[in-house]
Image (cartoon, rainbow, N blue to C red):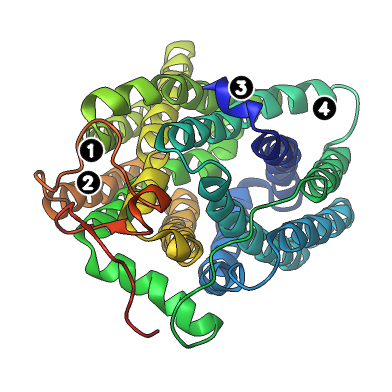
Amino acid sequence: MLSVLRNRTYRYLFTAQAVALVGTGLATVALSLLAYDIAGRGASAVLGTALAIKMLAYVGIAPLAGAVACRVPRRTLMAGTDVVRAGVALGLPFVTQVWQIYVLVFLLQAASAVFTPAFQATIPEVLPAERDYTRALSLSRLAYDLESLLSPVLAAGLLTLISSNWLFAGTTAGFLASAALVLSVVLPKPAPPEGPGGARARAGLGLRLFRTAPRLRALLALDLAVAASGAIVFVDTVVLVRDHFHRPASALSLALGAYGAGSVAAALLLPRLLHRAGDRAVMLAAARTLPIVLAVVAGLVAAPPGTWSWAAVLVAWAMIGAACSAVVTPGGRVIRRSVADRDLPAAFGARFSLSHGCWLLTYPLAGWLAGSAGLPVTAAVLGAVALAATLTATAVWPAGDGFGPGPVRTGPECGGTGRSATTGTVRPVSREPV
């Protein structure tokens, strides 16, 4: 997996991603504690609303950002958004009202909605070989996972020395370091988009690809299953730790770290699993475990708190992390095999927007249900959503679409064609006017 780091450009981009993720991880812990300090037992509702605002920024801006990435130099675009995010992070320690959290979260995530699709579309251009790109996807996922695992541990250690507000300084430093690393490399010039139309037309192209291709529609359903399961982790863990189990703030880092540990384990195993079983089999099998785990969580939090139930919740969080990683990581392969290289920014922008639309539904649902109906009902409802989404993906994604184990040639080595998301055959993609 680490062999792709021999590519200097990718090595610098990966490092930029990693240091920005560490800063984001510190901000996640700090924001949860800040919300608890301001709202107390209402922290879940505050976090649910704040994360819903984050998703609104992603859903509204990401498709246009993916289209703009075809026309604006990627290096300038990504470094500029890093600087914006660093500036916003500087303002978070001075928040004293809930509405201020909402405003700064929107500004921060609007910049992220521009950065991430541009970054995702750049990696297959830097690493055009299928095997290298698969390793890069797993390594990228591993970076997310290690952030989930190590950032809470780092935050727990720092909280013994400093107040939670100082954690936002780490966020600022991470974004500034990311900007410097992006500016230090020369990125390949993306293929020019074909057909008339501006950014809005290109954004519409990505959405049309997801609407018409069964494979991509199944990917969207799987994203909903992940969002339903992840929402209870990211929104309700702070209340679960502080109010249900009556544990200190450092236990929040432990719980989020368990989720990260499961995700790390899955990321390390994925390259070999995907080669042997194929994307469809791995992704659907992982998705099917999510509603089962959430049903177990509903039972655990309905029982009186104890040491054994706390340990069981940590195991459940690790299982959710592993399953979510196994569903999300191969998504880039699914997109790359389904569209032409020149349409990657539009497709990644559409996927970013649509997948976060799923989180837009589940984040407030997790927060509001926890505040009004309790954690057992929240876990049961989100488990039902995950089950329905998984069944939909299984029905929509044809079992014999030619998307099995092993690499599939596509992109530049196939003359710029994309693999049909309906039949699995190689065909030109998106030649129609947009």
Residue 226 visible in the shown view: no
Mark closest to the chain's N terminus, 1 or 3:
3
Q: Residue at x 61, y 26 (%)?
A: 146
Residue 390's disc number: 2
How far is mark 3 from mark 2, CA to CA? 29 Å
| Label 2: element kind | helix
Helix, strand or loop status at disc 3: helix
Residue 391 marker? none
| Mark 4 → mark 2, Cα distance in angstroms | 39 Å
Q: Nearer the viewer, mark 1 or mark 2?
A: 1
Q: Amino acid at mark 3?
A: Leu
Labels 3 & 4 near each other (Cβ < 8 A): no
Q: Earlier in the sequence, mark 3 or mark 2?
A: 3
Q: Quadrant of residue 354?
A: bottom left
- The amino acid sitting under disc 2 is Thr
Query: Local crowd at mark 4 within 10 Å, few (<14), some, or many (≥20)?
Result: some
Question: SS of the residue at dot 4?
Answer: helix
Q: Nearer the viewer, residue 171 or 424?
A: 424
**Of marks 4 and 1, the one in the foreground:** 1
Please report the residue visible at 38 percent of the width from the left and 39 percent of the height from the top: 330
Q: Residues within 10 Å of mark 3 (few under 14, many from 20)?
A: some
Q: Which residue is mark 4?
A: 159
Left of 242 or right of it: where is 77? right
Q: Residues within 10 Å of mark 2 (few under 14, many from 20)?
A: many
Residue that numbered label 1 is attached to: 284
| For marks 4 and 1 on the same chain, the one whose residue lies earlier in the sequence | 4
Earlier residue among tags 3 and 4: 4
